Amino acid sequence: MSKENKVSFKRMGHESIEDYKLSHSLETKYIKRLPDGILKALLRLDDTLAGYQVTRLEHSLQSATRAEAVGADI
């Protein structure tokens, strides 16, 4: 990332309005692409550990489903 795409401060309390505008712009772009990135990462779990009856994706979904069913805390 180039210097012009980074905020100028290294410590909270030293930021400027321009820093906030830049960070907001960068966060907005990041958040927009985040769901697709998460889905791609999850789908990669479906192609792992050859030879097992259940993929890592299936295991993750089963575990999450069981945890949710019993009201487990995140």
Image (spheres, grey):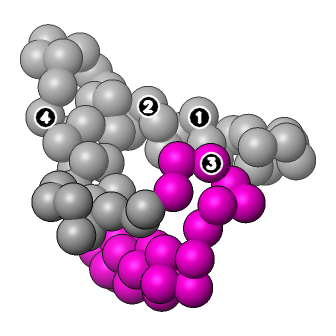
Please report the bounds of the magenta region as a residue range: 9-34
Q: Nearer the viewer, mark 3 or mark 1?
A: 3
Q: Earlier in the sequence, mark 4 or mark 2?
A: 4
**55 relative position to 49: left or right:** right
Question: Where is residue 51 shown, x and y percent of the image?
Answer: 14, 13
Q: Which residue is mark 1?
A: 63
The one nearer the camera, 62 or 48, is 48
> What amino acid does circle 3 point to?
Arg
State yes or no: discs 3 and 2 in contact (Cβ < 8 Å).
no
Q: Residue at x 41, y 64 (%)?
A: 7
Q: Residue at x 18, y 42 (%)?
A: 44
Q: Which residue is mark 2?
A: 59
Q: Which residue is mark 4?
A: 47
CA gap, disc 3 and disc 1? 40 Å
Q: Earlier in the sequence, mark 1 or mark 4?
A: 4
**56 relative position to 52: left or right:** right
State yes or no: discs 1 and 4 in contact (Cβ < 8 Å).
no
> What amino acid does circle 4 point to?
Asp
> What amino acid does circle 2 point to?
His
> What amino acid does circle 1 point to?
Ser
The one nearer the camera, 59 or 1, is 1
Residue 55, quarter of picture: top left
Q: Is residue 31 visible?
A: no
CA gap, disc 3 and disc 4? 42 Å
State yes or no: discs 1 and 2 in contact (Cβ < 8 Å).
yes
